[in-house]
Image: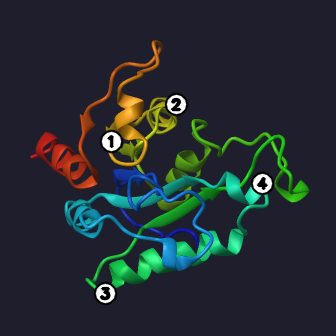
Amino acid sequence: MEATARRGRPAPAVFLDRDGTLIEDVGYVDRLDRLRLYPWSIEAVRLLRRAGYAAVIVTNQAGVARGMITEQIVLDARDHIEGALGRVGERLDGHYHCPHLPDAAVAAYRARCECHKPAPGMAVRAAAELDLDLARSYVVGDRWSDIQLAAAAGCTGILVRTGYGASQAAEPPPDLAPPPVVENLLEAAGWILRRHA
């Protein structure tokens, strides 16, 4: 199951990139012993959810299309992250991943889709399934594709300097309004919460 249904007024969300934002970017996570949450990630998710934001992972996993990893390891990684959150009484509200590429080596994943970031498909699907308000939502990530996703979905983007973020921040795309740039996910959570204090 990818999503946990919510009831009532559409909720704001924080869409979290996975590699380089929530967990250390170690290349393709092909074994769970390579998955390492940043030390601040659980606290950031806890703060956001307690403030009323849905916490939703949106992650490109092109390694599946390239035959480098299986889709099952992506799901196992999701469960591992959920387990770490569960130990402190927290959880994700949703997890969406895109395994597609137009030139995928694995035929089953060969597609020009609307879910591969920077396309907004994962956020749009999450909004429909979880009853989320995109206009009050955020996308936090370490690549410009995350910020472009935010713009395409009508959310606010925040770039973190972890993962590829520091090098990305040094070379902003000329056609993209500069987003807030913060050190890590915990600082992003603080920025969001201060904005709505």
Query: In the rendered view, does 23 fall on the left or right side of 112?
Result: left
Task: Quickly name the residue at label 4.
Answer: 66
Badge 2: residue crowd in 10 Å (few <14, some 14–19, many ≥20): some
Q: How far apart are the alpha carbons under marks 2 and 4?
A: 26 Å
Q: How far apart are the alpha carbons under marks 1 and 2?
A: 14 Å
Q: Nearer the viewer, residue 168 or 79?
A: 168
Q: Residue furthest bottom?
A: 87
User: Residue 162: x, y in percent?
Assistant: 34, 47
What scheme was used to colour the molecule? rainbow
Q: Residue 118: which quarter of the image?
A: top right
Q: Is residue 16 above or below residue 170?
A: below
Residue found 50% across the figure and 36% down from its top: 153
Label 1: which secondary element: helix
**Amino acid residing under circle 1:** Arg
Badge 1: residue crowd in 10 Å (few <14, some 14–19, many ≥20): some
Task: Quickly name the residue at label 1.
Answer: 136
Task: Quickly name the residue at label 3.
Answer: 87
Task: Quickly name the residue at label 2.
Answer: 152
**Amino acid residing under circle 2:** Ala
Residue found 87% across the figure and 58% down from its top: 108
N-terminal of the two: label 4 or label 1? 4
Query: In the rendered view, does 106 fall on the left or right side of 148?
Result: right
Q: Is residue 71 above or below residue 122?
A: below
The answer to whether mark 1 and mark 3 are in CB contact below 8 A is no
Residue found 38% across the figure and 39% down from its top: 165
- Nearer the observer, disc 1 or disc 3? 3
Q: Residue furthest right?
A: 107
Say the numbered circle drawn on residue 170: none
Q: How far apart are the alpha carbons under marks 4 and 1?
A: 35 Å
Q: How far apart are the alpha carbons under marks 2 and 3?
A: 35 Å
Q: Is residue 64 above or below residue 158?
A: below
**Amino acid residing under circle 4:** Arg
